[in-house]
Image (cartoon, rainbow, N blue to C red):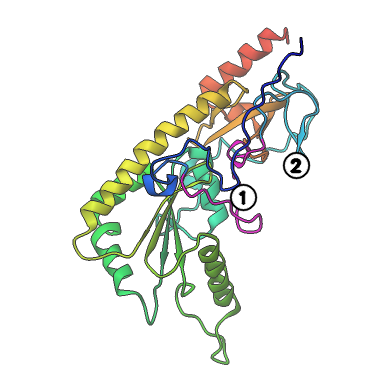
Amino acid sequence: MEVRTIRPKSPKKDGSSGSGGGLSAAVAGHPHAGVTKVNEDVASGIAPEEAGFLPYRVGEGTKVQGLLLPSDDQIEWAEMDPNAELDFGKGAALKAKRKTPWHWNYQEARRESMRTGKPLLIWFTRTGTPGSPMCARLKRELFGDQEFTKWADEKLVRLMVDASGGDRETDEFGQLAKDLVARRKYAEKLKDQFRVIGQPTLVMVQPDGAVYFQERGYSRGEKKELWGKMRNAVLTIEHNRGVWERKMAAKGYRRWTGKNGEVVFAKLTRYRNGYLLLTEPDGHQIKTSQKDLSPDDRGWIVAEKEKRGL
């Protein structure tokens, strides 16, 4: 008798699962609603698993979209360049501090979000002349509130995208400076990417790169409601991140912490004479030194070496 082969149903072209009924994911507030994949020249660090091309099981020599993924079963204890790329031992006090808690560079903010697991809040605004009265009110009532700032420092990575390019600058001929023009073009590119129309617009992005919600406009007295929406979003995103990290832990990924408090979520793919090569979920590789890791991480390496009789 012929054995019947059971195959999973193919997803519909519109991306629905075919379960039918109810609101769309975007309307219902599903944590992965409105997933936006950002162009490579704008973004970096979108988690391969969320982008749909990280296999559950990775064997030796597995390549996906041209990327050679590290094996799930082997750490390569081999020769490597001893120059550390990420100095976990450098004191945090020696790092240059921004004058504002808001990032200006998307790639920088995106990678911090991915590494720390904090959601990325993008504020599309317009300063200068003419500026946006609603943006000024939002800044004054919510973003300038000390209680909000304290909460956001702990829970969010923040990015400001200014359609005006920031402070007005002109050259000796009275023309807009080239860097100002470049900043305006960059802002326009991000606006197009996130389909932003008008300012202010707030976009909450999960550490995996998916857009959680987008909020346009701000009126007097909306502070409590908007902040409440952010709090609820962060709670859900933190839960989703925990589930994702536990799944990735089965593939060998873990949190690595430096003496200075820097944290990355990565997998050890190479080790030699006290130097490590760490691979983040998006394939980005980091070289660092064992002596600059936290005591717990150094202990983990010692235990792994003992398992291998090294």
Q: Which residues are magenta?
A: 33-53
What is the secondary structure assignment of the residue under circle 1?
A: loop
Q: Quadrant of residue 141?
A: bottom left
Q: Is residue 38 magenta?
A: yes
Q: Is residue 26 magenta?
A: no
Which quadrant, please, contains the N terminus? top right
Q: Residue furthest left?
A: 221
Q: Is residue 254 left or right of residue 216?
A: right
What residue sits right under mark 1 in the picture? 44
From the viewer's side, name the closer residue of 127 and 55: 55
N-term-proximal mark, 2 vs 1 = 1
What residue sits right under mark 2 in the picture? 65
From the viewer's side, name the closer residue of 257 and 30: 30
Question: Of circles 2 and 1, which is in front?
Answer: 2
Q: Position of residue 105 (x, y in %)?
A: 53, 59
Q: Is residue 242 left or right of residue 66?
A: left
